[in-house]
Amino acid sequence: MYLCHMRRIAARLLRSFLQGLLLLSPIAITAFVLYSLFDKVDNLLPFIHWRGVGFIIIIVVVTLVGYFGTRFFIGKWLFDAFEYVMEHTPGVKFLYSSIRDVIKSFVGDKKRFNKPVWVCVNVNPEIWRIGFMTQRDMTHFGFDHKVAVYMPHAYAISGWVIITDGKNVKPVQGMTSGEAMKFAVSGGVTTVEDEETNAKKDQL
């Protein structure tokens, strides 16, 4: 009897520990990532000895570069000239253009991952996967009536591109591009209903 009672207490303590781990892990990991990012950016200016000043200076400089580089002719001309040199330097142009295109796909004025679609990847049994249409017409690549779809991997920043017939693709309904990306990366765990429920809780 005593041994059975101790087992129940141990099981309850273990369950409470796992619940606490479940509650604290997302907070701890998020805090660690944000702190690591802050620390790395702040240390980019080693001659600044006051904590946080380097971070603020870099944020201000990047913001000013973005503002003057797009608003004024001289700034835009300088960046265009620099981009031209990078794109015509052997060995550098491929790395530079690839990184530039990926960044612009997420944060540029012409975002590419903004058309979430469902793709039928198997007919029998019927299997659908979520992705983002990146090319509506693949004719210039030798694929008539085909489209290109990027499919992110779950719990990773990687993904793969498939070329499929346009009839196998249909737009995602009821989700924004951000929600679709979260749905794909989370392995389908995060849903729009979860987001709406959390939003309602925040309003209470």
Image (spheres, rainbow, N blue to C red):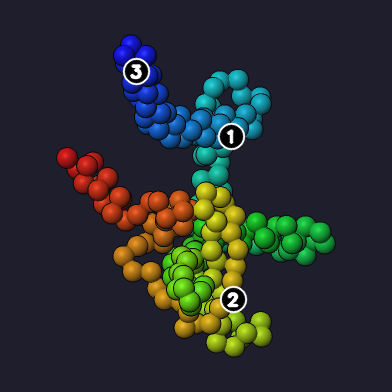
Mark 2–mark 3 Cα distance, whole angstroms, equals 60 Å
Depth check, mark 2 against mark 3: the one in front is 3
Could you tell which of marks 1 and 3 lies nearer the N-terminus?
3
Local SS, label 2: strand
Mark 1–mark 3 Cα distance, whole angstroms, equals 54 Å
Instruction: Tell me the kind of residue under disc 3.
Output: Cys
Residue 163: mark in rendering: 2
Residue 70 higher or lower than 129, as above or below: above
Q: Is residue 190 left or right of residue 52?
A: left
Residue 201 higher or lower than 175, as above or below: above
- Whole-percent x, y for residue 37 in the image: 55, 35
Residue 102 higher or lower than 11, as above or below: below
**Rendered-image quadrant of the N terminus:** top left
- Whole-percent x, y for residue 117 in the image: 44, 70
| Mark 3 crowdedness (10 Å alpha carbons): few <14, some 14-19, many ≥20 | few
**Rendered-image quadrant of the C terminus:** top left
Q: Quadrant of residue 116?
A: bottom left
Depth check, mark 1 against mark 2: the one in front is 2
Instruction: Tell me the kind of residue under disc 2.
Output: Ile
Residue beneath disc 3:
4
Could you tell which of marks 1 and 2 lies nearer the N-terminus?
1
Q: Are marks 2 and 3 in contact (CB under 8 Å)?
A: no
Between 89 and 35, the one lying in front of the other is 35
- Whole-percent x, y for residue 48 in the image: 61, 24
Instruction: Tell me the kind of residue under disc 1.
Output: Val
Q: Residue at x 51, y 45 (%)?
A: 63
Residue 41: mark in rendering: 1
Mark 1–mark 2 Cα distance, whole angstroms, equals 39 Å
Local SS, label 1: helix
Q: Residue at x 35, y 54 (%)?
A: 191
